[in-house]
Amino acid sequence: MDVSMTVWAVTLVVILAVLALDFFIVARNPHEPSLREATLWVIFYVGLAVLFGVGLTVAAGGRPGGEFFAGWLTEYSLSVDNLFVFLIIMAKFSVPRQYQQKVLLIGVALALVMRGIFIALGAEAIARFDWVFFIFGAFLIYTAWKLVTEAADEDDEFEENKLIKFVESRFPMSKDYDGARLFTGVRGSRMITPMFIVILTIGTTDLLFALDSIPAIFGLTQEPYVVFTANAFALMGLRQLYFLIGGLLDRLVYLSYGLAIVLGFIGVKLIFEALHHRGVHWAPEIPILVSLGVIIGTLTVTAVASLVKSRGSQPAEDDAGEMVSTSADGDAPDND
């Protein structure tokens, strides 16, 4: 697939323009979006991805288009799984709801930059060393196993990494948020705010997410343009998706298992492809349409099974008072 510098430039400009518009909207009016607002934005971004995929199919052929849709669905699903971690981080640091949009938007921008760097490094490594496929494949199989074991543990506790602990121990931090500011003055002293730690935590988490997602997308396509655009469209609208399905995330009980199947499948596909390139003729080459079918089928079954499971357990939980709560004055909380 021959992509000119002009096409690359136009794509980057459009993506940056969309992110700038998103940032402008959040900066101008920090708020918690309503269900209707979040839904419309998510539909808009999903529509953009579908239009881009159709346009890519028309312009470059069915294979690049199929690779884009397979990669986008995989990365989008991983992004949904990542929202679990974002929810835990927001809860741990008690981020005010009206400022969570800004945190998410900065997180998306950081993720896009980090993934862009990893894509460039991964493409160069693949071009020079075909044995990298074995490493990527093994890493994806390990990640799949880790998803299964972590899902079985059902541990929702977030543990701060060493960098976060180092910053907290070396720099004075205010106890309270000062709006969305990263630094504040307390009795004449310059201090970092809890928001600084939240942004740093989101950034380091994005780095770990990139380590999982980039090998997955390279297992579906080795075209840098398709890899980058699939990641970019998967990240667009992530903040709106956070508010749209935030209350539903705990109902996607089998999501980790579905992602484990997808990542494990891609890992095996990568290893087969590497063996085939090295002359092992019994190793099959899995067509992109088969990959797309496996991804769509697995995610569909996972979503349906999760909703059936959560619907079956919800009445008992409601009767026990575990799912329905009220505020201190007796009013039902606002779930918007």
Image (spheres, rainbow, N blue to C red):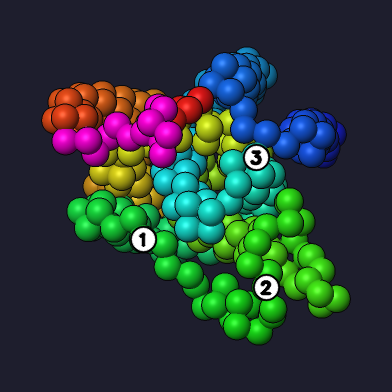
Residue depicted at x 38% and y 31%: 330
Residue range corresponding to the magenta coloring = 320-332
Query: Viewer-proximal residue, 297 or 222?
Result: 297
Image coords of residue 155 (percent x, y): 29, 58
- From this viewpoint, which residue is outermost toward the front? 329
Residue marked by disc 3: 98
Q: Are marks 2 and 3 in contact (CB under 8 Å)?
A: no
**Numbered label attached to residue 208:** none
Residue 196, image quadrant: bottom right
Name above or below for residue 120 compared with residue 76.
Answer: below
Label 3 SS: helix
Query: Viewer-proximal residue, 318 or 69?
Result: 318
**Numbered label attached to residue 173:** 2
Image coords of residue 229 (percent x, y): 64, 36
Q: CA distance from mark 1 to mark 3?
A: 24 Å
Residue depicted at x 61% and y 59%: 198
Q: Is residue 263 left or right of residue 305?
A: right
Mark 1 neighbour class, 10 Å CA radius: few under 14, some 14 to 19, many 20 or more: few
Residue 178, image quadrant: bottom right
Query: Viewer-proximal residue, 205 or 223?
Result: 205
Residue depicted at x 54% and y 21%: 35
Name above or below for residue 274 compared with residue 10.
Answer: below
Image coords of residue 336 (percent x, y): 51, 25
**Numbered label attached to residue 157:** 1
